[in-house]
Amino acid sequence: MAKSIQAIRGMHDILPDQTPLWQHLERSVASVLRGYGYEEIRMPLVEKTDLFKRSIGEVTDIVEKEMYTFEDRNGDSLTLRPEGTASCVRAGIEHGLLYNQIRRLWYTGPMFRHERPQKGRYRQFQQIGVEAFGMNGPDIDAELIFITARLWKVLGLDDVELQINSLGTNEARNAYRTVLIDYLTTHEALLDEESKRRLHSNPLRILDSKNPEMQAMIEEAPKLQEHLDEESREHFEQLLALLDAAGIPYRINTRLVRGLDYYSKTVFEWVTQSLGAQGTICAGGRYDGLVEQLGGKPTQAAGFAMGVERLVAMLEEQQNLEVSGAPDGYMIMVGEQSQRAGLVMAETLRDELPNLSLLCNSGGGSFKSQFKRADKSGAQFALILGDDELARGEIGVKPLRGNGEQQTVAHNDLAQHISNLINL
Ligand code: ATP
Ligand code: MG
């Protein structure tokens, strides 16, 4: 036997017994976003490497060590997208969607990062991204948070906490950066290797370090909050007031800095306790400078991305969520004429009941073996057609779940009978 080939580590198949949950999530997201007037955009999976270097930042986890970068046959350096915002902004500039306009966009699709695979952290993973352009906020920041809060409500996810912070304008952050570097330099002996390396290139990221030996020192560090510019402070206060008015609880987390360079002012994360270490299910914020940084006209922007695998994992924990991929009905056909007539009847039924999901037995078999398959399919009911029933213009309808009796129904009444039976 030939040796079988396995999938790449950290890249997973989503199997048929998992896809109903994914579809449930995707449908819920699409419906909530439609409710706020957001339009879907679809970008390529591969972009020029420079796009990510220029947007995410050279001294970030993603660009330093996580990107799948390769040389195209003509020598161009290309990268499998590690996130969607940069591509979305690139597409927006390229197609003139952003200049002097207001845009509310969303997308979903796989992202690629060469990280150490573990529960909730994969090398190919799915994100749902939402981006809003041309709006100053804080009302649009609030809208983005309302969208996520509504989605959790629709999905029945309640173990989630909103953490929020303001990074200030670039100028304020640069001023704070100097203060922070001074502080960290006086404690340089406590810094680990990575933090030493980042001391001058990306000191804010040091605040985000999970190293237990650095926690006390980080706790004592000067706070960005205390160095916020007036404009950012007001923006933040107004946003918090909007959240209060809408009854959305939050926790101000002054250490929340986000791993990408392009954020300014508002940043937020939704965190759950129910997934262990990889508890952030959604993260975002404002990125007012990014469009210009990527060659567009200055454009206000804000957005967020959700990790679909982590959301699905939370849905899997829910006891009473019933999402089934099973068909509604299973057509059993025994006898030569019935096998032919049954397929045609099934087509007619699909014309009459476009929402019906009907699985037709294929490959013959006795009543008994077809019933077994019907049961295994998870269908709600079986349609039973033998040559005798066919000759009488009738068909059997047998509920397969619960204890309903089998009934004999005239062919002409079948569509009506089914739609009464399962509420189509
Ligand atoms: P982390 O600090 O956990 O590495 P991040 O800051 O790199 O997260 P973002 O780039 O903000 O994450 O991505 C947004 C969301 O996408 C995350 O909150 C998470 O839910 C999801 N996500 C990010 N990386 C992965 C991954 N490797 N596997 C699965 N989901 C991921
Ligand atoms: Mg990461």
Image: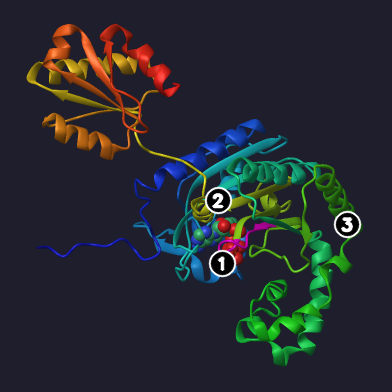
| Gap in angstroms between the C-alphas marked 3 and 2 | 28 Å
Q: Which callout, 1 or 3, points at the residue further toward the start of the chain?
A: 3
Q: Residue at x 20, y 7 (%)?
A: 393
Q: Residue at x 53, y 56 (%)?
A: 310
Magenta residues (range): 269-279
Q: Residue at x 51, y 54 (%)?
A: 317
Q: Residue at x 81, y 79 (%)?
A: 221
Mark 1 or mark 3, which is nearer to you?
Answer: 1
Is the magenta region chiefly helix, strand or loop?
A: loop
Q: Is residue 120 left or right of residue 12?
A: right
The image quadrant where one finds ligand 1 is bottom right
Residue on which the image places disc 3: 233
Disc 1 crowd, CA 10 A, few/some/many (<14, 14-19, 20+): few
On whether residue 129 falls in the magenta region, the answer is: no
| Gap in angstroms between the C-alphas marked 2 and 1 | 25 Å
Observer-nearest of 296 and 284: 284
Residue on which the image places disc 2: 84
The C terminus lies in which quarter of the figure?
top left
Q: Secondary structure at mark 3?
A: helix
> Compared to 172, does 150 lie above or below?
above
Q: Which callout, 2 or 1, points at the residue further toward the start of the chain?
A: 2
